[in-house]
Structures are given as C-alpha cells and as structure tokens.
Amino acid sequence: MYELKKLSRVYPKGRGKVAALSGVDLEIPDGEFITVQGLTGHGKTTFLLMLGALDKPTSGKIIFDGKDLGAMPESQLVDVRAQNFGFIFQNYNLLPTLNAEENVEAALVPLGIPTAERRARSIAALTEVGLGDRVGHFPSEMSGGEQQRVAIARALVKEPKVILADEPTGNLDEVTSLEIVALMEKLWKQRGMTLVLVTHDTKVARRAPRTAVITKGKLTMRDNRAPKVITQGPPGAAKPAGAPKPA
C-alpha cells in the first residue's frame, strides 16, 4: 500500500523554483488500478518517479509497505525497485542488440536468478503477452505494439507488486493502443498487482476505477464509476432515449 503525506517536489528553474508536486495526500491500496492525467509539465511524470523510488520528495513522505522511500539510502532503494516495481515506458526502452527473450531476461539478472530459470520465466512472460512465437526476434523486426508487449513482459517477469506505466500507448495507433490497454487490464485482474498508468487519453483513463488528475502540482481524484447525473430540461424538452413516460 502507498501512503502519500503532504508530498512535495520542487525543482530549480533558472533563478527560481517550480513545484512539480505540492502537498499531495493520497492512499493507493494494494491491487488497485488508477490512471493519472494532467497537462504536460504539471507533475505526472514526477508523480510516477516518486512511486517508483526513482526520485525523492523535497518535503512530505511517500510510504510503501510501511517504508518511507524518501528516507531510505540509494543502496536500499536499488533493492526495493528491483524486487517490487515493474516499469513500462512510452519509448519501450528495449536494447536493440538483444532479442525479445534477452530483453525480458535482463530484468532478472540483478535478482541473482539462475540462467535456466531466467530463460524459462522470460519465455513464459512473452507467451503470456502473446509473443510466444517471437522470442528470438529483435526490436527492429517488431511492430510498435509488439515492442510494447515485450516491455510489458519485461515488467511482469519479476512478478512485481506494482506496475508503473508512463504513457505506454503514446507511440501507438488507436487500435493498437486499445489492445495494449486491454492486455494490461487483463494482467492486472489476473495477477492482483497494483497498476498506475499515466495517459493523455481520457478514454484510456476512464477504464480505471479512479483517476488522479494533476494540475500545477496539485492532485485531485476522480471516481470513474460514479453515476452520471442527467439534468432535467425545461418543460417540453426532449427526454433522453429510453426515459420512462409519465403515468
């Protein structure tokens, strides 16, 4: 579980400063799927970096499983990241000289897992994302959607508690984007992991139960499952299709 308490991150900008996050309070229970939206430069990526222990707060706390990530030394954070977090990026971040299986296997090397087990788990992860027949292909031999599936397999192969995805559909066409989001949603349900997905696409954002909307460093939560309110028009106005007729 995440607990964010008065979390702020301030960066120097010229002779002044800019607050990427300002006084954020939030709880994210284990196994929740939330999306994150906001204008460019308003703090979305900083928020994700904080959740992934890739940046530290200027003030406030970010607590993960009872541990204050902001207070931990880098030597400990390396282990926390390796054991708990899987990252997915817009640009895939695959190594061009490695094939799909090798790219996925690279995520397991820091964990000290034996070679045979690494290979078996990598092939299983690629099969799970629909690439069981592409394990020997290189990134240059794959479409954008296939490369992102490799990136998803690489994030999953560690069996992390949390998947953090930064605009994972940003470089994909609409049809492929929907396929990737549907795949991630399916894996979230099957594995029971926490999924935090940054997206500019409102259609994608609304697939999660909740959306964190970040505006100039301030965060508000939107409930995507709240019932929509239909306002009553003036007398004689057309009623919504399917509305009951008066008795």
Image: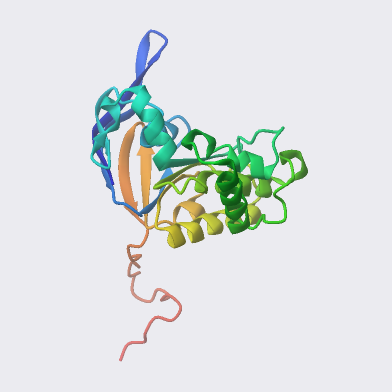
**Residue depicted at 30% across the width and 92% down the height:** 247
In the displayed structure image, the side of residue 9 where residue 94 appears, left or right = right
Q: Residue 196: x and y, percent? A: 42, 46
Q: Residue 212: x and y, percent? A: 36, 45
State whether residue 215 is above or below residue 188: above
State whether residue 147 is above or below residue 71: below
Q: Residue 27: x and y, percent? A: 26, 46
- Please identify the residue farthest to the bottom as the structure is shown: 247
**Residue depicted at 26% across the width and 31% down the height:** 7
Can residue 47 be seen by looking at this rendering? no
State whether residue 244 is above or below residue 150: below
Task: Using the rendered view, name the quadrant where residue 179 is placed.
Answer: bottom right
Q: Nearer the viewer, residue 68 or 203?
A: 68
In the displayed structure image, the side of residue 34 where residue 23 appears, left or right = left
In the displayed structure image, the side of residue 246 where residue 202 appears, left or right = right
State whether residue 112 is above or below residue 56: below
Q: Residue 198: x and y, percent? A: 46, 43
**Residue depicted at 37% across the width and 37% down the height:** 51
